[in-house]
Amino acid sequence: MKRCSAILRAMTMTKTIWIKAALLLLAGPVWAGPCRDLTFEDTSFTVCEVRAVDDLRLWLKDATGALIGTPERLVASLAPGEHLAFAMNAGMYHADRAPVGLFVENGTQVHDIVTSEGPGNFGMLPNGVFCAGRDFAVIESRSYAAAPPDCRFATQSGPMLVIDGALHPRFLPDSDSLNIRNGVGVAPDGQTAFFAISNAPVSFHHFARLFRDVLGTPNALFLDGSISRLVAPDLGRADLGVPMGPIIGVVTHD
């Protein structure tokens, strides 16, 4: 019994040290960060607010062609004077971390859009694309494919959470399918995007109503579920998890 207790203490200490090291690595100068915690229907969420003038980016690989995958590698890839304000996973990916659907990084399309119905959450049509150009937009995938806008960064995922003010038709208010979830919604004027993650398992219906009823976004997109994680240095937060595929976040400058 004493040996088991010692092992548990050692594991707890190792995890604590890892988290502290990660936060030190991610920390930069003190600024008013974009993320805040809020409660909606007795569930805690963290929401990061981004303006169209902010330096929002999508990442997949570094300059050598190696997958970034982790916040630590992401921070190491930034230029001198650049600092990570927040980052989270940016959509679904295959076992090799390649995006499932459309992925545009710094104006270059890395992966084609997928418009067919399919298995899993991604294929639960309508799905959509988050586009960041001169402004922000969440666009239904087939509409995007028919008239692609000018996106500096874009990521496809699914299902859409909110579609022109309506919840996805397959969401059930009494669903018992609960999970940690993250997603993005865009304000009506396209000048603000809200990235949210639940801090407890929630249904799609509950999560979608956060975007529609609290954040006021007429269109919102689910990014992912059980693997969802957030790094927000201003909140002292660096979620643990396996290496990711696409990552989205905001960079600040000295």
Image (tube, grey):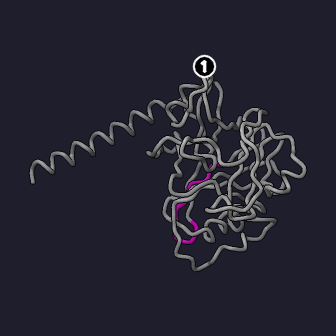
Q: Locate residue 90, reporting x and y percent.
A: 63, 46
Q: Report the residue at 60% width, 40% height from top.
A: 32
Q: Which residues are magenta?
A: 40-48
> Any magenta on residue 30?
no
Q: Locate residue 159, reporting x and y percent.
A: 68, 61
Q: Quadrant of the C terminus?
A: top right
Eyeballing the image, is 209 above or below 188? below
Residue under numbered circle 1: 80
- In the shown orientation, is residue 68 left or right of residue 15? right
Question: For residue 204, what is the image quadrant?
Answer: bottom right
Eyeballing the image, is 10 above or below 214? above
Eyeballing the image, is 226 above or below 64? below
- In the shown orientation, is residue 81 left or right of residue 125? left
Q: Report the residue at 81% width, 65% height from top.
A: 164
Outermost residue on the left side: it is: 2
Q: Report the residue at 83% width, 57% height from top.
A: 142
**Toward the viewer: 38 or 95?**
95
Main SS of the magenta part reads strand
- In the shown orientation, is residue 252 left or right of residue 20? right
Q: Locate residue 146, reporting x and y percent.
A: 89, 52
